Image (cartoon, rainbow, N blue to C red):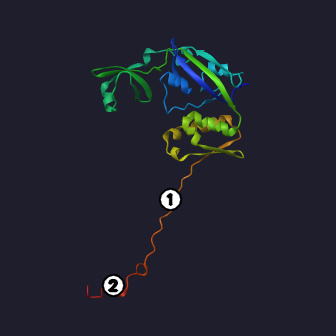
Amino acid sequence: MMNEGDFIKITFEMRIGTDKRLVATNIESIAKENDMFDEEQDFNEMPVIVGTKDLFDEINKSILGKNVGEGDEVEIKSEKAYGERDVKNIKVHPYSEFQKNKIDPIPGNEVRIGNRRGRVLSVSPGRVVVDFNHPWAGKDVFYKYTIVSKTEDDVGKVQNMIQQHVGKLWSSFQVEESGDNINVTIPEDMKFNMEWFNEKFHVINTAREHLKGKTIVLIEKYELKAEETKPEASESNAEGSSNQDLPEAGNE
Protein backbone atom coordinates (compact mmCIF):
# COMPACT_ATOMS: atom_id res chain seq x y z
CA MET A 1 0.00 0.00 0.00
CA MET A 2 1.44 3.38 -1.05
CA ASN A 3 2.22 6.13 1.45
CA GLU A 4 3.72 9.60 1.20
CA GLY A 5 7.47 9.48 0.62
CA ASP A 6 7.38 6.13 -1.19
CA PHE A 7 9.59 5.77 -4.27
CA ILE A 8 7.60 4.22 -7.09
CA LYS A 9 7.74 3.79 -10.85
CA ILE A 10 4.75 4.32 -13.10
CA THR A 11 3.63 4.22 -16.70
CA PHE A 12 1.40 7.11 -17.70
CA GLU A 13 -0.56 8.96 -20.36
CA MET A 14 -1.33 12.66 -20.04
CA ARG A 15 -4.07 14.17 -22.18
CA ILE A 16 -5.52 17.67 -22.25
CA GLY A 17 -8.70 19.45 -23.31
CA THR A 18 -12.16 18.23 -24.16
CA ASP A 19 -10.75 16.13 -27.01
CA LYS A 20 -8.27 14.48 -24.61
CA ARG A 21 -5.32 15.13 -26.90
CA LEU A 22 -2.25 13.12 -25.89
CA VAL A 23 0.63 15.43 -24.88
CA ALA A 24 2.93 13.12 -22.90
CA THR A 25 3.49 9.42 -22.22
CA ASN A 26 6.28 7.00 -21.38
CA ILE A 27 4.57 4.09 -23.14
CA GLU A 28 6.45 3.62 -26.41
CA SER A 29 3.62 1.90 -28.31
CA ILE A 30 1.16 4.68 -27.47
CA ALA A 31 3.71 7.35 -28.45
CA LYS A 32 4.15 5.67 -31.85
CA GLU A 33 0.40 5.36 -32.37
CA ASN A 34 0.07 9.11 -31.82
CA ASP A 35 3.13 10.18 -33.89
CA MET A 36 4.91 11.31 -30.73
CA PHE A 37 7.80 8.86 -30.71
CA ASP A 38 11.20 10.44 -30.10
CA GLU A 39 14.37 8.36 -29.86
CA GLU A 40 15.80 10.86 -27.37
CA GLN A 41 12.92 10.35 -24.93
CA ASP A 42 13.17 8.00 -21.96
CA PHE A 43 10.46 5.36 -22.36
CA ASN A 44 11.40 3.54 -19.17
CA GLU A 45 8.93 3.53 -16.28
CA MET A 46 8.94 6.99 -14.71
CA PRO A 47 10.20 7.27 -11.11
CA VAL A 48 8.24 9.54 -8.77
CA ILE A 49 8.09 10.14 -5.04
CA VAL A 50 4.57 9.99 -3.67
CA GLY A 51 3.39 13.24 -2.11
CA THR A 52 5.91 15.57 -3.77
CA LYS A 53 5.28 18.46 -6.15
CA ASP A 54 6.47 16.34 -9.06
CA LEU A 55 2.84 15.26 -9.38
CA PHE A 56 -0.42 17.19 -9.20
CA ASP A 57 -2.13 16.94 -5.79
CA GLU A 58 -5.04 15.01 -7.31
CA ILE A 59 -2.65 12.33 -8.61
CA ASN A 60 -0.83 12.06 -5.28
CA LYS A 61 -4.14 11.58 -3.47
CA SER A 62 -5.17 8.94 -5.99
CA ILE A 63 -1.95 6.95 -5.51
CA LEU A 64 -2.20 6.85 -1.70
CA GLY A 65 -3.49 3.47 -0.54
CA LYS A 66 -2.99 1.74 -3.88
CA ASN A 67 -0.76 -1.28 -4.52
CA VAL A 68 1.72 -2.23 -7.23
CA GLY A 69 -0.19 -3.15 -10.38
CA GLU A 70 -3.06 -0.79 -9.68
CA GLY A 71 -3.76 2.55 -11.32
CA ASP A 72 -6.36 5.18 -12.07
CA GLU A 73 -7.38 8.00 -14.41
CA VAL A 74 -7.49 11.37 -12.69
CA GLU A 75 -9.05 14.58 -13.98
CA ILE A 76 -7.40 17.84 -12.95
CA LYS A 77 -9.39 20.99 -13.65
CA SER A 78 -7.56 23.70 -15.56
CA GLU A 79 -7.35 26.10 -12.62
CA LYS A 80 -5.53 23.44 -10.59
CA ALA A 81 -3.42 22.24 -13.51
CA TYR A 82 -1.68 24.90 -15.62
CA GLY A 83 -3.98 27.75 -14.67
CA GLU A 84 -6.42 29.78 -16.72
CA ARG A 85 -5.31 31.85 -19.67
CA ASP A 86 -4.55 35.42 -18.63
CA VAL A 87 -4.55 38.28 -21.16
CA LYS A 88 -1.96 40.01 -18.96
CA ASN A 89 0.52 37.35 -20.07
CA ILE A 90 0.21 38.44 -23.71
CA LYS A 91 2.87 41.06 -24.33
CA VAL A 92 3.93 43.27 -27.24
CA HIS A 93 7.67 43.54 -27.86
CA PRO A 94 9.51 45.77 -30.36
CA TYR A 95 10.86 43.88 -33.36
CA SER A 96 14.25 45.47 -32.73
CA GLU A 97 14.52 43.49 -29.48
CA PHE A 98 14.46 40.26 -31.46
CA GLN A 99 16.95 41.57 -34.00
CA LYS A 100 19.28 42.58 -31.19
CA ASN A 101 19.16 39.02 -29.79
CA LYS A 102 19.40 37.44 -33.26
CA ILE A 103 15.98 35.81 -32.96
CA ASP A 104 13.76 35.34 -36.00
CA PRO A 105 10.19 35.62 -34.62
CA ILE A 106 7.92 33.27 -36.56
CA PRO A 107 4.24 32.88 -35.53
CA GLY A 108 3.79 29.66 -33.60
CA ASN A 109 7.45 29.33 -32.61
CA GLU A 110 8.61 29.28 -29.00
CA VAL A 111 10.96 32.06 -27.91
CA ARG A 112 12.78 32.99 -24.73
CA ILE A 113 12.79 36.61 -23.66
CA GLY A 114 14.70 37.27 -20.47
CA ASN A 115 13.80 34.37 -18.17
CA ARG A 116 10.38 33.73 -19.72
CA ARG A 117 9.32 31.32 -22.42
CA GLY A 118 6.51 32.30 -24.75
CA ARG A 119 4.92 31.58 -28.10
CA VAL A 120 4.88 34.08 -30.93
CA LEU A 121 1.28 34.95 -31.85
CA SER A 122 1.84 37.49 -34.59
CA VAL A 123 4.50 39.59 -36.28
CA SER A 124 3.81 43.00 -37.81
CA PRO A 125 6.03 45.92 -38.84
CA GLY A 126 7.91 47.03 -35.76
CA ARG A 127 6.30 44.74 -33.21
CA VAL A 128 5.86 41.12 -32.12
CA VAL A 129 3.03 39.77 -29.97
CA VAL A 130 4.13 36.99 -27.58
CA ASP A 131 1.89 34.78 -25.44
CA PHE A 132 3.59 33.87 -22.14
CA ASN A 133 0.73 31.69 -20.91
CA HIS A 134 1.56 28.03 -20.50
CA PRO A 135 0.68 26.17 -23.74
CA TRP A 136 -1.84 24.07 -21.80
CA ALA A 137 -3.32 26.91 -19.77
CA GLY A 138 -7.11 26.88 -19.69
CA LYS A 139 -7.33 23.15 -20.41
CA ASP A 140 -8.35 20.32 -18.11
CA VAL A 141 -5.79 17.52 -17.68
CA PHE A 142 -6.56 13.79 -17.78
CA TYR A 143 -3.80 11.68 -16.27
CA LYS A 144 -3.89 7.88 -16.52
CA TYR A 145 -1.27 5.91 -14.64
CA THR A 146 -0.33 2.40 -13.48
CA ILE A 147 2.02 1.66 -10.57
CA VAL A 148 4.67 -0.70 -11.91
CA SER A 149 6.99 -1.07 -8.92
CA LYS A 150 8.01 0.25 -5.52
CA THR A 151 11.68 0.86 -4.68
CA GLU A 152 12.76 -0.08 -1.17
CA ASP A 153 16.59 -0.02 -1.20
CA ASP A 154 18.65 3.17 -0.94
CA VAL A 155 20.75 2.47 -4.03
CA GLY A 156 17.60 2.07 -6.09
CA LYS A 157 16.17 5.29 -4.66
CA VAL A 158 19.27 7.26 -5.67
CA GLN A 159 19.08 5.72 -9.15
CA ASN A 160 15.46 6.85 -9.31
CA MET A 161 16.45 10.39 -8.35
CA ILE A 162 19.09 10.50 -11.07
CA GLN A 163 16.64 9.16 -13.64
CA GLN A 164 14.12 11.84 -12.66
CA HIS A 165 16.60 14.55 -13.56
CA VAL A 166 18.65 13.21 -16.50
CA GLY A 167 16.24 10.78 -18.16
CA LYS A 168 17.59 7.87 -20.16
CA LEU A 169 21.21 8.83 -19.35
CA TRP A 170 20.74 7.59 -15.77
CA SER A 171 21.80 4.02 -16.59
CA SER A 172 25.43 5.09 -17.18
CA PHE A 173 25.80 6.27 -13.56
CA GLN A 174 27.36 3.73 -11.19
CA VAL A 175 25.67 3.74 -7.77
CA GLU A 176 27.01 1.66 -4.86
CA GLU A 177 26.40 1.56 -1.12
CA SER A 178 29.32 1.55 1.32
CA GLY A 179 28.29 1.80 4.97
CA ASP A 180 26.40 5.04 5.40
CA ASN A 181 27.68 6.33 2.06
CA ILE A 182 25.97 6.09 -1.31
CA ASN A 183 28.76 6.44 -3.86
CA VAL A 184 27.77 7.80 -7.26
CA THR A 185 30.45 7.56 -9.96
CA ILE A 186 29.85 10.10 -12.71
CA PRO A 187 30.24 8.61 -16.22
CA GLU A 188 32.85 10.10 -18.53
CA ASP A 189 30.37 11.66 -20.96
CA MET A 190 28.49 13.45 -18.14
CA LYS A 191 31.40 15.17 -16.40
CA PHE A 192 31.10 18.26 -18.57
CA ASN A 193 27.38 17.93 -19.33
CA MET A 194 25.61 21.18 -18.38
CA GLU A 195 22.31 19.38 -17.83
CA TRP A 196 23.89 17.20 -15.15
CA PHE A 197 25.82 20.17 -13.72
CA ASN A 198 22.50 21.92 -13.05
CA GLU A 199 20.47 18.88 -12.03
CA LYS A 200 22.90 17.29 -9.57
CA PHE A 201 21.97 19.89 -6.95
CA HIS A 202 18.33 18.79 -7.21
CA VAL A 203 19.41 15.17 -6.75
CA ILE A 204 21.39 16.08 -3.62
CA ASN A 205 18.53 18.13 -2.15
CA THR A 206 16.06 15.30 -2.77
CA ALA A 207 18.44 12.82 -1.15
CA ARG A 208 18.83 15.06 1.91
CA GLU A 209 15.07 15.08 2.34
CA HIS A 210 14.36 11.40 1.78
CA LEU A 211 17.53 9.50 2.75
CA LYS A 212 18.16 10.58 6.32
CA GLY A 213 21.41 9.35 7.83
CA LYS A 214 23.03 8.72 4.47
CA THR A 215 25.83 10.61 2.73
CA ILE A 216 25.87 10.99 -1.04
CA VAL A 217 29.42 10.90 -2.41
CA LEU A 218 29.84 12.08 -6.00
CA ILE A 219 32.94 10.59 -7.61
CA GLU A 220 34.54 12.04 -10.72
CA LYS A 221 37.53 10.11 -11.98
CA TYR A 222 39.98 11.70 -14.41
CA GLU A 223 42.61 9.47 -15.98
CA LEU A 224 45.76 11.48 -16.54
CA LYS A 225 47.83 10.60 -19.55
CA ALA A 226 51.18 9.05 -18.69
CA GLU A 227 54.15 11.30 -19.40
CA GLU A 228 55.62 10.45 -22.74
CA THR A 229 59.00 8.70 -22.44
CA LYS A 230 61.72 10.61 -24.26
CA PRO A 231 64.02 8.52 -26.45
CA GLU A 232 67.36 7.75 -24.83
CA ALA A 233 70.08 10.05 -26.09
CA SER A 234 73.20 8.64 -27.73
CA GLU A 235 76.50 8.89 -25.82
CA SER A 236 77.56 11.95 -27.74
CA ASN A 237 74.20 13.59 -27.21
CA ALA A 238 74.09 12.72 -23.56
CA GLU A 239 77.61 13.96 -22.76
CA GLY A 240 77.93 16.63 -25.38
CA SER A 241 79.61 16.55 -28.76
CA SER A 242 83.18 15.21 -28.99
CA ASN A 243 86.05 17.69 -29.09
CA GLN A 244 86.77 17.02 -32.74
CA ASP A 245 83.31 18.33 -33.57
CA LEU A 246 83.94 21.60 -31.76
CA PRO A 247 85.55 24.43 -33.66
CA GLU A 248 88.94 25.41 -32.34
CA ALA A 249 89.26 28.84 -30.81
CA GLY A 250 90.04 31.37 -33.42
CA ASN A 251 89.22 29.00 -36.33
CA GLU A 252 85.56 29.70 -36.68
* Quarter occupied by the C terminus: bottom left
Asked if the residue under mark 2 is in contact with the one under mark 1, i.e. CB atoms within 8 Å, the reply is: no
The part of the image, by quadrant, that contains residue 223 is: bottom right
Between 30 and 226, which is closer to the camera in this rendering?
30
Residue 202 vs 120, above or below: the answer is below
Q: Circle 2 — which element?
A: helix
Q: Residue at x 53, y 40 (%)?
A: 196
Tell me which residue sits at (33%, 22%) in the image: 128
Q: Secondary structure at mark 1?
A: loop
Location of residue 76 in the rendering, given as x and y in whole percent from the top left corner = 58, 16
Q: Nearer the viewer, residue 134 or 225?
A: 225
Residue 161 on image: x %, y %: 61, 35
Quarter assignment of residue 181: top right
Q: Which residue is mark 1?
A: 225
Disc 1 residue type (three-letter): Lys
Q: Which residue in the structure is indicated by mark 2?
A: 245
Asked if residue 71 lies left or right of residue 141, the reply is right
Q: Determine whether, in the image, residue 104 is placed left or right of residue 170.
A: left
Q: Which mark is residue 85?
A: none
Q: Position of residue 99 (x, y in %)?
A: 31, 30
Instruction: Quadrant for the N terminus, please.
Output: top right
Q: Residues within 10 Å of mark 1 (few under 14, many from 20)?
A: few
195 w.r.t. 238: above or below: above
